[in-house]
Image (cartoon, grey):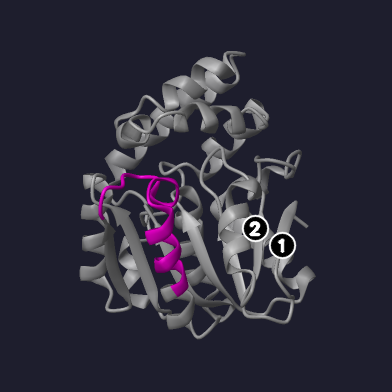
Amino acid sequence: MLNHTSHGHPEAPAVLLLHGFMGSAADWDSTAGALSEGSFCVAPDLPGHGGSTGLPDEAYTMEGAAQAVMGLMDGLGVRRATVAGYSMGGRLALYLALRYPERCAGLFLESASPGIEGTEERAARREDDEAKAGHLESGDFEGFLRGWYRQPLFVSLARREGMVEALISARRCNDPRELARSLRGMGTGSQPSLWDELENLRVPTLAVTGEMDGKFVGIAQEMAERSQRISVETIPSAGHSVRLEAPEAYLSSVRRSISRAGGG
């Protein structure tokens, strides 16, 4: 099974928590602790992250990661779960709901997308992901980390004193070569576009974004236009990392999502 943490009683309604790129199960400790009274929260290290390393090549893809997550659920005796995911973990959560709907009670997507719809744009993103993977393998992991959090996506995060440094410190626990494998196999350029499948979504879905993350606010709104199952919530005074920038509002949204899915 994937390396993982769990909080709460195994007989309570299950909540599966999927981290973003360079994250780990530990990212969810505070959230899982807050939800554990009425839920069984399971947070895996996704392939290439934390303690889930040295896996077969096929595990570092959307389908391979989905199968690994299903294997974890089977091993823990979890039949269905509300699936919450951030960024890369949100893309995986959506993939799970579309490919394995019988295992998903509901979705909570934080700053996530269905991938890239255009073929040329997806190819360009694969080239960019490959360049980033090469940087990860170059031996300059510290430079990669600092460059990553200088991206426009994280401008609002950088305005919060000490938050970027804390994240960089946490991300150092990863193996950069394993992160490169994940980026090549699970990056937005490599994953299949799920846009045309949104109309087939069968589970209640809440797409949450921060109001300062204009790109993903637009993506969430377009997702809702393509599926009646998707509702959108925009959190004030937050950017891409809603959980970190507006923790109380984030937790309230997660609880509403779990309740909507029939758990907790």
Rendered image quadrant of residue 152 = top left
Q: Compare residues 30 and 48 and report the one nearer the observer.
A: 30
Q: Which comes before the other along the chain, label 2 or label 1?
A: 1
**Disc sitting over residue 185 in the figure:** none
Image coords of residue 173 (percent x, y): 67, 31
Q: Which amino acid, by three-letter code, is at mark 1?
A: Ser
For residue 46, say whether it is visible: no
Q: Which amino acid, by three-letter code, is at mark 2?
A: Ala
| Left or right: 70, with 218 as reference point | right
Image coords of residue 185 (percent x, y): 55, 42
Element class at badge 1: strand
Please tell me which residue is depicted at 56% across the width and 22% down the height of the picture: 136
Image coords of residue 86 (percent x, y): 46, 53
Magenta: main secondary structure equals helix
Please tell me which residue is depicted at 61% across the width and 61% down the height of the picture: 32
Instruction: Please say if 4 is above or below 107.
Output: above
Per the image, the residue denoted by label 2 is: 43
Per the image, the residue denoted by label 1 is: 6
Q: CA distance from mark 2 to mark 1?
A: 6 Å
Q: Compare residues 94 and 195 and report the one nearer the observer.
A: 94
Q: Compare residues 140 and 264 and report the one nearer the observer.
A: 264
For residue 92, say whether it is visible: yes
**Mark 2 and mark 1 residues within 8 Å of each other at the beta carbon:** yes
The 10 Å Cα crowd at callout 1, few under 14, some 14 to 19, many 20 or more, is many
Instruction: Please say if 99 is above or below 170.
Output: below
Numbered circles on residues, count: 2
> Magenta span covers which residues?
236-255
Specify the quadrant that holds the N terminus.
bottom right
Image coords of residue 79 (percent x, y): 67, 80
| Left or right: 196, with 91 as reference point | left
The 10 Å Cα crowd at callout 2, few under 14, some 14 to 19, many 20 or more, is many
Taking the view exactly as shown, the residue that stands out farthest to the bottom is: 262
